[in-house]
Amino acid sequence: MMEFIVSVDNQFYEISELVTKISYEDKLNDGCSKLEFSYINNNLEIKNGSAVKFTYKNANIFQGYVFKVSRGKGNEISITAYDQLRYCKAKDTLVVKGDTVTTLVNKMCNYFKLSKGDIADTKYILATGVQDDKTWLDIIYSAISDTSLHKGKQYALRDEFGMISLRELGKLGTDLILGDNSLCYDYKFDQSIDDDFYNMIKLVSKDEEAKKVDITVKKDESSIDKYGLLQYYENIDKKYNSSQIKEMANNLLKLHNKEKETISLDCIGDTRIRAGSGFYCLIGDINYNKKLMVKSVSHDFLPSHTMSLEVMNDTGD
């Protein structure tokens, strides 16, 4: 049913019969995935730096390295392991010139000597500049956001069982249905305009030398009548022309001019689900029927497989 392999002093051991607890956590564009487990020490001491590989019901769940070993009285030891993206938390100075998210991911993998998987071609050329005193992950996440704003497509940077991949979110859908009549045994649902909701976008571009200020406004009058005026304001670099700024305003209004729905689900586990996965959510109690995407997920595998999900609206086509 499961295979749990660790390396100790260049020797590999299958320890599934010794493992007493397994929890896997994955977040969308928010650092590395994490595997926490406990095992009975049977003269086998797992060390920091040890490789870990975990599969469940023939599904590849996690491959990474041990970063923390905890023990107390008794012979049970707790381990925390992370995937390869953990190494990319390092700060650096990076010159971005003629780069896309794709080229940045390739540069990161080459620099840290990480194994590469499927890396999507994002095509959008990022603005030239120097990224200083920032982590590689933060630089790439910022580039993903910039690309999404201009191209309308979102991407997930993640480790897929030992291979760094960049995936278009719209292509990570599944045919899974989760709801009050399908695998889900509890949920929490919130609707809000209190956080990250705007129905008027104001973008200001200043040219100090020419003593010129250009203001671009995009708004939804019907939304303002319904909710009141909720304004988003941002100073825009003068390197962007008026058509680009108008496109930004349109995209920002499209993105933020809707009630924020937050839903979390507690479900029977499914190995297909990780951050970025798309699925259908059907909850009859609140007449909820939508295609959603996983923002973060935590899987617990023992004594039985369950999962807790935080989700967001699907961004796929």
Image: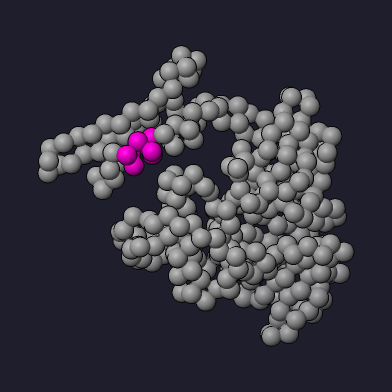
Residue depicted at 78% across the width and 70% down the height: 4
x and y percentages locating residue 258 in the rendered image: 53, 28
Name the residue furthest top. 225
Magenta region, residue range: 243-249
Residue depicted at 63% across the width and 29% down the height: 190
Relative depth, front residue between 181 and 172: 172
x and y percentages locating residue 314 in the rendered image: 62, 41
* Residue 114 can be seen in this image: yes
Residue depicted at 81% across the width and 69% down the height: 3
164 w.r.t. 241: above or below: below
Classify residue 43 as left or right of residue 194.
right
* Residue 230 can be seen in this image: no
x and y percentages locating residue 246 in the rendered image: 35, 36
Residue depicted at 75% across the width and 54% down the height: 272
Report the magenta stretch's main SS. Answer: helix
- Residue 254 within the segment the image draws in magenta: no
Relative depth, front residue between 61 and 168: 168
38 w.r.t. 13: above or below: above
